[in-house]
Amino acid sequence: MAKLLHMPEVAAGSTEALLSQWLVKEHGSFGAGDPIAVIETDKAMVELEAEHDATLAGILAEAGSTVEVGSPIAVLVDPGEDFTDLNAVLGRLGIARGPSTDTTARAGSTPAPLPEGPGAAPTATEEQERIFASPLARRLLKQAGLSLADVHGTGPHGRIVRKDVERAIAARVDGGAAAANGSAAQTSAAEPTNVSRNPPEAARPQAPASEAGRQAAAAPPGLAEIIPHTRLRRAVAARLTRSKQQAPHFYLKGSARIDTLLALRSEVNQVSAIRVSVNDFVIKAAAYAHQQVPQMNVVWQDETMLRYASVDIGVAIASPRGLVTPVVRSVDARPLGSVAREVKDYVEQAGAGRLAQSHLEGGTLTITNLGMFGVEEFAAIINPPQAAILAVGAGRREPAVSDDGTLTTATVMRVVLSVDHRAVDGADAARWMSEFTKAVEQPMLLLL
């Protein structure tokens, strides 16, 4: 039996999401639990899993299109069911495609009326007149001042997709420039060379109607590529801009000798089933400092301050799909190996786009570490609504003075703590830095 697959509400309260990628081709079969599409929210990319065995009879929303929650994105049929006439199947489901509406109906909207009752298929004449396009393509066409008839669709069943619109816009820009240049050349040849005057209006290149066209026309020579922002990158940019504008940051710099930590890590990894990193020790040290200074384990709100009992810490991960900060829960109550395993799982899930929205919510502090890239020291922007973020640099061998006053060398790691001054006072942040440094230099405290 045919049924519609709708855009799910991946994030609580979301009204739309980006259909980033189809993992199953049209007419392809899949089983219950198989991932069939990748959906991009403001914070992560999530795989949409099949609820039952089925075949993807038809795609109603192209990859790269933004779809309202609840809108149909595909037609599914039972394994072995006939679906050769997709339009007839859509008719039985109460979905019709017309010249002014895409197959991806908006949630809450009334489906376009069917030709002769809800079960009738479109006639051959109607089918020839209809031009299919994704919602994103239609929006770009409207911005560019183009019509569906101006574009040749290369998507499934001749559907117009984003790249078709971009190609049409580029062709119009190139054509307009060529026509303008030709007109200017003719005018120049007809006029005396010693006469200086403005070219006639018709000879001037006309500005493209769309933003995409203006960018293409204004692109500097040698530009390799214009890369559209992903939904995730736009969300990160907006969130961090808001944080820097609204949260009054202040910064504390600290340093710790990590030779003892490195030796203990080597011993732990000889017996541990999961490899423990320096960053895992840093996460545990931050949780230890939160226990000693609970004034840091808070979140600022306009009317209240939220103070938490357990210590939940975010870990910044630069995945191929973008920056994400999943949260490790109850770090204070978990052994080092358990923290290391969860961080490793988060790295794998971030790379594959399998992080859930729940993984990205909560926490009062984030750890961001660029030491593996050789960065010695940097300051980071707080991830709202958290109260602080700790930027961790690389450990470097440098001169040091031992307890007995002799000159020696030590491996020193520098950190910078960015703090929201609305939520945390300077003295409390300074005490936190002292406790954190103590835990790093005496790492046995983290194994107790």
Image (cartoon, grey):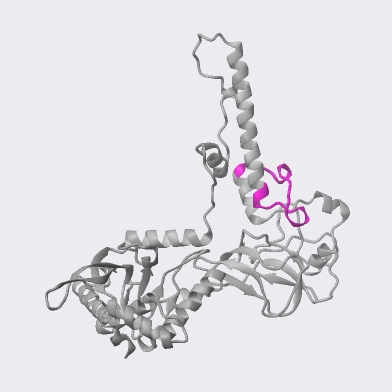
The structure residue drawn at horizontal position 46% and vertical position 82%, both measured from the top left corner, is 341
Residue furthest to the left: 405
Q: Quick check: can you spot residue 45?
A: no
**437 or 159, which is in the foreground?**
437
Q: Identify the residue at image location x=71%, y=62%.
A: 60
Left or right of residue 411: residue 51: right
**Which residue ends up furthest to the right in the rendered image?**
124
| Residue 324 covered by magenta stretch | no
Q: Nearer the viewer, residue 394 or 251?
A: 394
Total numbered labels placed on residues in the image: 0
Q: Is residue 146 magenta?
A: yes
Residue 44 in the image: state x and y as whole percent.
Answer: 52, 68
Give the magenta-colored segment's residue range: 144-164
Looking at the image, which residue sits at the far bottom? 448
Which x, y percent locates residue 307?
31, 81
Q: Is residue 63 left or right of residue 413?
A: right
Q: For the C terminus, give its image quadrant.
A: bottom left
Q: Is residue 386 left or right of residue 437?
A: right
**x then y, percent, for residue 259:** 28, 76
Q: Classify residue 343 by image quadrant.
A: bottom left
Residue 213 visible, this angle: yes
Of residues 92 and 299, the one nearer the viewer is 299
* Quarter of the N terminus within the rendering: bottom right
Examine the rendered structure and indicate whether residue 208 appears above or below residue 124.
Answer: above
